[in-house]
Structures are given as C-alpha cells and as structure tokens.
Amino acid sequence: MQDTGKKSSPFHIALVEPEIPPNTGSIARLCGATDSVLDLIHPLGFSTDDRHLKRAGLDYWEHVRINHWPDVDAFLEAQDEQRLYFFTTKTRRPYYEAHFRPGDCLVFGRETRGLPEEILDLYQDRCYTIPMTNPNIRSLNLAMSAGIVLYEALRQQAISSSCCRNS
C-alpha cells in the first residue's frame, strides 16, 4: 500500500462527567499534541472557563478539537459501539490486549467514581484496565491513564502503518 500522505482518522478521548479541571486541561493538551479529539460528556464538575483548566492547557486550546455532549446517553447513541473502549479498575483485561484503530474512542469515567456501573455492565466485553502491581494503590491519575492508553493506541497504529507501507 502506498503512503498518500493523507491523515488517518484521529483517536478520541471521551471523559464522562470529569470533575477535576487540571486533569481535563492536561488531557486537552495531550489531545492537541497528538491531533486527537476530546469529547467532554456533561455534566462537568467545573466550568470550562475555570482558570486551572485553562492553565493546564496553557495556550494550546485553539489547537484542540473538543466536542461537548449533553449527557452519556447522547454520546453513546451517536457512537459505533465497536469503536468504543472503556477503561476501569473493575476488570482484569489489560489495555494492551485491545487492538486500536484510528477513529477509536477511549472512554474514561469520573476521577472519584469511574464509569457508571450500567455502562460497565452493558459494555463489559469492551472494558480494559491499566494493570498495577501494588494493591495499596487504588487507581492512577485520569490524565496519566489517558496518556498511557492513547500512546499505546498510537504505537499500535505506527506499527500497523509501517508494516503495510512496503506491501
């Protein structure tokens, strides 16, 4: 296959009802740096004018594509469920077993409660976790988790693209 220089579909990071402005700001910056799309699912636990949110994104906000969704139901109804990957501490399947493709959406829940149980039950075959070896640590920071998973998706895409260029 020949490289046409055409950009593939961006990955999406969806945050379901995020609560902490600096986490969302850091994830927005991550999305800007990787040409990914940020999907913010309301209600948010802060105003998008929050100074901590703006500071975390610094002056990169104009370079970030952000979609706002009124609620999780509206978001889910508009998606191809085969392109959704949900991240939670309530499963054993590690994130690196997922096979990501451009255009996929990486979905993360609230910092304090994670994703709603109804979503985890409905999409249990699409749930993944970031393994941790220390049982005393409950979870990783939301922005760190988003970065780990997004860069794994980008890594998989780079391997997939490079193996197909010479075909």
Image: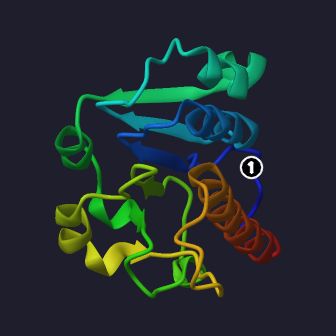
Query: Nearest the camera: 9 or 139?
Result: 139
* Residue 68 relative to residue 145: left or right: left
Query: Nearest the camera: 88 or 84?
Result: 88
Residue 24 percent coordinates (x, y): 56, 36
Q: Which image quadrant for residue 101? A: bottom right
Q: Is residue 35 above or below residue 87?
A: above
Q: Quadrant of the C terminus?
A: bottom right
Q: Is residue 34 above or below residue 133?
A: above
Q: How is the image coloured?
A: rainbow
* Residue 153 relative to residue 33: left or right: left
Residue 105 percent coordinates (x, y): 45, 54
Q: Is residue 32 above or below residue 132?
A: above
Residue 26 percent coordinates (x, y): 67, 37
Q: Residue at x 37, y 27 (%)?
A: 68
Around disc 1, counting alpha carbons within 10 Å, would you say few (fewer than 14), some (14 to 19), or many (20 or more)?
A: few
Q: Residue furthest front?
A: 136
Q: Which image quadrant for residue 131? A: bottom right
Q: Is residue 80 above or below residue 157?
A: above
- Which residue is tagged 1? 4
Q: Residue at x 45, y 76 (%)?
A: 128
Q: Quadrant of the N terminus?
A: bottom right
What amino acid is found at the position of numbered circle 1 in the picture?
Thr
Query: Nearest the camera: 65 or 48?
Result: 48
Label tally: 1
Q: Residue at x 35, y 56 (%)?
A: 113
Q: Residue at x 35, y 40 (%)?
A: 17
Residue 119 percent coordinates (x, y): 23, 62
Secondary structure at badge 1 equals loop
